Image (cartoon, rainbow, N blue to C red):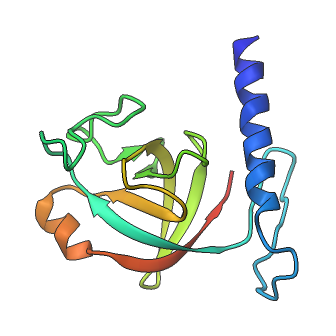
Amino acid sequence: MELESTLSERDKEIERLKSQVNPKTTNKNHDVKTSENDVETAWQTGEFTAYYPANNALQGGTVTAKGDNLCDSLYYNGYQIVAAPPEIPFDTVLEIEVDGQLIKAIVRDRGGAIKGNKFDIARSNKTNAYDFGRKTGRWRIVE
């Protein structure tokens, strides 16, 4: 019963996010539904930063909002862990394209400054996070 309620809420949230996409877009990557369980939304522009496991409030600690220990792995079920705005439900799978690189990611974390179209990608250490910097790219919901 609880699982059905959670799935229903997630479906409603995905539909709400899809409705925010401009239906008049001329981008060739407009909404596609590949099966009843897979939903792809149009690409949207976003701002991407990186964070790393650190035992301080600025970096958010070593454990994600969903309880993943970033010191053990930056991945969950084979997907890169990201912090996303609260409008995107936990466990939503995303495709993120930054600097020509495609990242398959999963929402497992939140952050105080993560709002709108801002995302924070988990990296292994401070150097990797700082090297990533702040970038503009694009993202879409895959499932």
Q: Is residue 94 left or right of residue 10?
A: left
In the picture, the quarter occupied by the N terminus is top right
In front here: 56 or 11?
Answer: 56
Residue 125 in view of the camera: yes
Quadrant of residue 66 in the image?
Answer: top left
The residue drawn where x is 51% and y is 60% is 104
The residue drawn where x is 82% and y is 68% is 31
Residue at the extreme top: 1
Q: x%, y% of residue 105?
A: 49, 56
The answer to whether residue 141 is above or below residue 6 is below
Quadrant of residue 47 in the image?
Answer: bottom left
In front here: 54 or 102?
Answer: 54
Count all numbered tags in the image, as a single digit.
0
Q: x%, y% of residue 30?
A: 80, 75
In front here: 43 or 124?
Answer: 43
Q: x%, y% of residue 80?
A: 42, 54
The residue drawn where x is 44% and y is 80% is 136
The residue drawn where x is 53% and y is 65% is 117
Residue 38 in view of the camera: no
The answer to whether residue 140 is above or below residue 108 is below
Residue at the extreme bottom: 26
